[in-house]
Amino acid sequence: MKKIIVIGGGIAGLSAGIYGLQNGYEVALYEKNATPGGECTGWNRQGYHIDNCIHWLTGCTPTNDLYPIWQNIGALTDDTTLYREPYFYCLQRDGKTLHFWSDLEKARAEFLETAPEDCLEINKLFDHIRLSESVRVPCEKSLADMNMIDYLKFGMTMADMGKVIKEYGNDTIADLAARFQNPLVREMLTQYLHDSYKAITLLSSIGFYTGGGAAIPMGGSVDMIKRIVDRFLSLGGKLYTNMPATGIQIDSWQAKSVSFADGSTTACDFVICAADPAVTFNRLLPAKYMDKKLRKMYETKEGYHVSSAFHISFGILGSEGYGLPCGSSVHPCKPYRVGTRDFDHIGIRLYDYDESLFPADKRVLQCNIPQEQEDYEYWKALHADRPRYLAEKEKIAESVRQRICGLFPALENKLIVLDTYSPYTFTKWCGAYKGAYMSFFEQKGYKSLTAKNSIRGLSNVFLASQWLSTNGGLPMAAVSGRFAVMNLMKKDGKISKSSRA
Ligand SMILES: Cc1cc2nc3c(=O)[nH]c(=O)nc-3n(C[C@H](O)[C@H](O)[C@H](O)COP(=O)(O)OP(=O)(O)OC[C@H]3O[C@@H](n4cnc5c(N)ncnc54)[C@H](O)[C@@H]3O)c2cc1C
């Protein structure tokens, strides 16, 4: 059996490992942390559970192309119960609430009632959200490997997206909001995702809900990773944790072995780098091997944006409702500062939907406060001064707690700070580029890009990561693992160019 070394035990690495094993390879997966899962993880604090990752998993309907991939890697099994949220998010202001309901017609009716003056634009928006439910993640072949015919065929399977692109393709979220007169509608559109992101990103995210594809597997991120690791191990995969890779030894355009922080070196036939590419190309391989599309995304800062968040998790004492809306909600509030910027809204997310993780007296409120690249530099510098870093995190948690209690007075004395983590935490933890845990978001005037899983100039090294495609997320990570193995098998003469793993 030929041996694949997978570096990095996030979703991309685990997916690559599973597809490698299923196609007859021996797989050894090396993860730098004590537990696999990468950014898809959760942890316990003071008897509460913090689910770091899954707000929504797309592809949770059997008709979706992603579904067989989720099943194959064990993310979804026949026993997995799915929770579907009633809405994507809501905005509350002055006693009024506007929702992006998962029931599209219910949302349309609420918007029309709130803003009859915007009737034309509202109907247009919801008609196009319906059309954007057709958006698909390429699961059979990477966009980077498609020829013109593949590309046209794939495009035809989501022909309705063409109409969405025609109407909103040049709009940012800010441009989209400017089409509306009603201030609540404008606020609703601009306060969830960064308003410089493409409007289509917002429409397709809402479409994941209205189309029924977005759901949360009960047991959350930790259980999902456990199922995937179980699948990997049951197929004979070997998992080594606390094993950061430090280099890949190259000779005559081939990787011969991988070295690790404990001083050991392991020989291999193939390597799949599933760490963040910022780690792969800075620490494991010379940067000259980086695919030109990936390089373009890193180098064109104005066109390909990365962002992160400052996170605060609160435990809720007691089991009363306290007037909290379910799921994700956005609220205007008194200004507060996080990193280098000021905010006048607060986004909160209530974790109460999964009795096994969040029993009635152990519910959690999380706030993810958006942070940009300048904030990342701020947190990185502050981290060097540990007491100041900790004090700043504590100060922010208190100012956010006060604002939440201002919005929901019944919560006074009912919130305890469980954890705070900054963008820099994601870098320390997973090697995340600029603390970002989604990939690049293409800006207005810039195309969505997908980089290759193979590496020019190296015949047996491949890449798997959410970062190979713009937008990223769990689906991109999972399919990139599969595509890495397909590319490997082509190089190994195991499959023809058109076959798949
Ligand atoms: C707060 C938050 C919320 C999110 N919400 C969602 C959501 O609702 N839906 C969604 O689809 N996605 C969501 N995501 C994004 C999702 O978590 C990521 O897209 C996905 O987990 C990325 O997987 P990956 O395998 O590409 O990378 P990673 O998870 O970063 O995995 C890379 C792995 O490589 C390891 N590694 C790094 N360096 C080395 C080394 N030298 N040697 C060995 N191992 C190494 C890291 O420790 C890590 O385990 C969220 C992420 C966060 C943080």
Image (cartoon, helix red, strand yellow):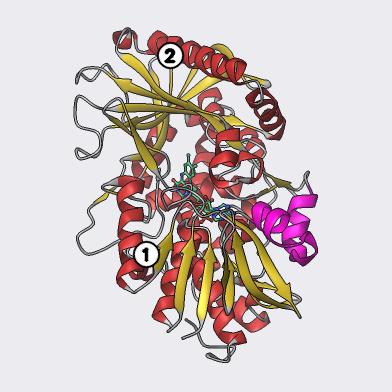
Disc 2 and disc 1 in contact, CB within 8 angstroms: no
Confirm whether the magenta stretch covers residue 296. yes
Disc 2: which residue: 401
Mark 1 residue crowding within 10 angstroms, few (<14) / some (14–19) / many (20+): many
Element assignment for label 1: helix
Disc number for residue 70: 1
182, 253: nearer the viewer: 253
Foreground of the two, 500 or 60: 500
Q: Position of residue 11 (x, y in %)?
A: 46, 58
The residue closer to the viewer here, 447 or 72, is 72
Rendered residue at 41%/77% (across/down): 21
Residue 128 lies, in percent from the top left, at 51, 52
The secondary structure that most of the magenta stretch takes on is helix
Give, as a three-letter code, the residue at label 2.
Arg
Q: Is residue 62 visible?
A: no
| Residue pictured at 55% horizontal, 76% vertical | 141
The percent position of residue 31, horizontal first and vertical second, equals 49, 56
Marks 2 and 1, how far apart at CA: 37 Å
Residue at horizontal 56%, vertical 29%? 422
Residue 112 quadrant: top left
Region rendered in magenta: 277-300
| Mark 1: amino acid | Trp
**Label 2 residue SS:** helix
Location of residue 282 in the rendering, given as x and y in whole percent from the top left corner: 72, 54
Q: Is residue 41 above or below residue 291?
A: above
Which of the pair 175/251 is nearer the observer?
251
| Between discs 2 and 1, the one toward the N terminus | 1
How many neighbours does mark 2 have within 10 angstroms: few (below 14), some (14-19), or many (20 or more)? many
Q: In this rendering, would 338 be left or right of 368?
A: right
